[in-house]
Image: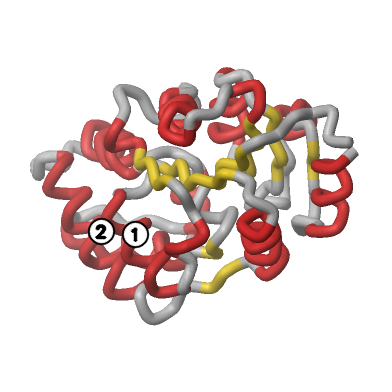
Amino acid sequence: MNTKKIEAVIFDFDGTLVDSEENYFEADRILLKKHGLDIDTEFKKQYIGIGAFEMMEDIRTKHSIAAPTDDLVNEKNEIYLEIASKNTKVFPEVAEFVKYLHAHEYKTAIASGSSKTVINTLLECIGFSAYFDAVISSEEVNRGKPEPDVFLAAAERLGVSPANCLVLEDSVYGVLAAKKAGMKCCAIPYIKDKIDDIFYHADLFYEDEFDFNETVKWLNK
């Protein structure tokens, strides 16, 4: 018997369902180089889990980039889609979990800091559009992660109480947002060289890789 009463599972997109961070890094590198800023992977790490708009706004402010934030985001999305449409990998065990949930009639959603156009385009590319009942971008809410708005919007769209939702996340900001939303959280850190203490507050925590079988067992206890 499922005593947790999980009725819906909400997935972060980048770094959780799809291994996209290298593609995003390359898009950011190309974009910011055009605006006179050279970045490395350490620079990028500080923005993992933050929405595209919030990231570009912060970089624009700190590095005195003249272009408007909206223009930077749109340009980044164009560069990213050109790269990612040819080179996006799905995490196999997470993909298996998505299919399991679909087969067992759980409600599912994507709730991500990426642009809705990017999410929908890549879901189509990887053949996963039919598996999700809703797609929510932080562009559609007032505040991005670590605030809970995008997860609460997903729960509302699905018609499920936050207490009956499980979130899958790879970032500190995402875990914080899930807990603020009053949801259960499964954490799979994308950056594994330094695990933040926040991850240990998740209801399920995989320090290495997501485990499909263990998660299904947890779901059905």
Res 64 → quadrant: top left
Q: Tell me the kind of residue under disc 1.
A: Asn
Q: How crowded is mark 2: few (under 14 residues within 10 Å), some or many (20 or more)?
A: many
Q: Give the left or right position of residue 204, taking residue 176 as reference.
A: right
Q: Measuring 50% from the left and 45% from the top, which residue is drawn there? A: 109
In terms of image quadrants, where is residue 51? top left
- From the viewer's perspective, is the residue at label 1 or at label 2 nearer? 1
**Amino acid type of disc 2?**
Asn
* Secondary structure category for the residue under label 2: helix
Relative to 46, residue 83 above or below: below
Camera-nearest residue between 139 and 213:
213
Badge number at residue 77: 2
Would residue 169 be seen by someone viewing this image from the given angle? no
Q: Do the residues labelled 1 and 2 touch (CB within 8 Å)?
A: no
Near-viewer residue (84 or 8): 8
Provide the residue designation for mark 1.
120
Residue 209, located in which quarter of the rendered image? Answer: bottom right
Q: 204 or 80, which lies in front?
A: 204
Among numbered discs 1 and 2, the one appearing first in the sequence: 2
Circle 1 SS class: helix
Percent of width and height locating residue 171: 59, 41
Task: Tell me the crowding category of disc 1: few under 14, some 14 to 19, or many 20 or more residues within 10 angstroms, Cα based.
Answer: some
Left/right placement of residue 85 relative to residue 181 reads left
Query: Residue placed at 34% from the left, 59% from the top?
Result: 120
- In this rendering, would 114 be left or right of 219? left
Could you tell me residue 63's position as x and y percent? Answer: 24, 39
Question: Residue placed at 37% from the left, 56% from the top?
Answer: 119
Residue 89 picture location, percent across and down: 54, 73
- Image quadrant containing the C terminus: top right
